């Protein structure tokens, strides 16, 4: 099951429910799977809100967001056209961020 996890300080994103739905839809698009119930129910996004004290760099800044994308083993090797033609997940996430759907961090 393709999944995406986002870890950030509480309050970083104004609408975590919408963010999770948008990220799951983006992951489906990047994976290139058909928009059918089997894939809609098995592609998930999780937004983890942490206390700002739970993340920091060496200087103590906590304005970081960690994004982890998990796909099936070998998915990028078995179907490299999905990544090449549709763009990499990072680019898709950057598009989400620049459109305002991921909000502004920092």
Image: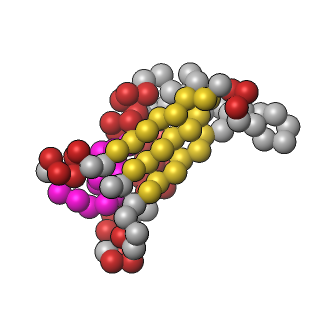
Does 45 sit above or below residue 105?
below
Does 72 sit above or below residue 61?
below
Quarter the C terminus occupies: top right
Q: Quadrant of residue 105?
A: top right
Q: Position of residue 81 (x, y in %)?
A: 32, 74
Quarter the N terminus occupies: bottom left
Residue 81 within the segment the image draws in magenta? no
Query: In this view of the protein, which residue sits in the foreground, 82 or 41?
Result: 41
Residue depicted at x 39% and y 73%: 74
Q: Quadrant of residue 85?
A: bottom left
Q: State the predominant SS element of the stretch in magenta.
A: helix
Residue depicted at x 43% and y 62%: 88
Q: Quadrant of residue 45?
A: top left
Give the magenta part as a residue range.
23-35
Residue depicted at x 37% and y 64%: 72
Does 9 sit above or below residue 67?
above
Q: Position of residue 47 (x, y in %)?
A: 47, 35
Residue depicted at x 53% and y 47%: 67
């Amino acid at each position: 099951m393709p999944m995406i996890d986002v870890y950030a300080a509480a309050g970083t994103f104004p609408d975590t429910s919408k963010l999770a739905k948008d990220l799951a839809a983006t992951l489906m698009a990047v994976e290139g799977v058909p928009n059918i119930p089997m894939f809609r129910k098995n592609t998930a996004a999780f937004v983890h809100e942490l206390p700002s004290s739970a993340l920091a760099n060496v200087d103590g800044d906590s304005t970081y967001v960690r994004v982890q994308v998990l796909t099936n083993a070998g998915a990028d090797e078995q179907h490299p056209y999905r990544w090449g033609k549709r763009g990499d997940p990072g680019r898709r996430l950057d598009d989400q961020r620049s459109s305002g759907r991921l909000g502004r961090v920092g």
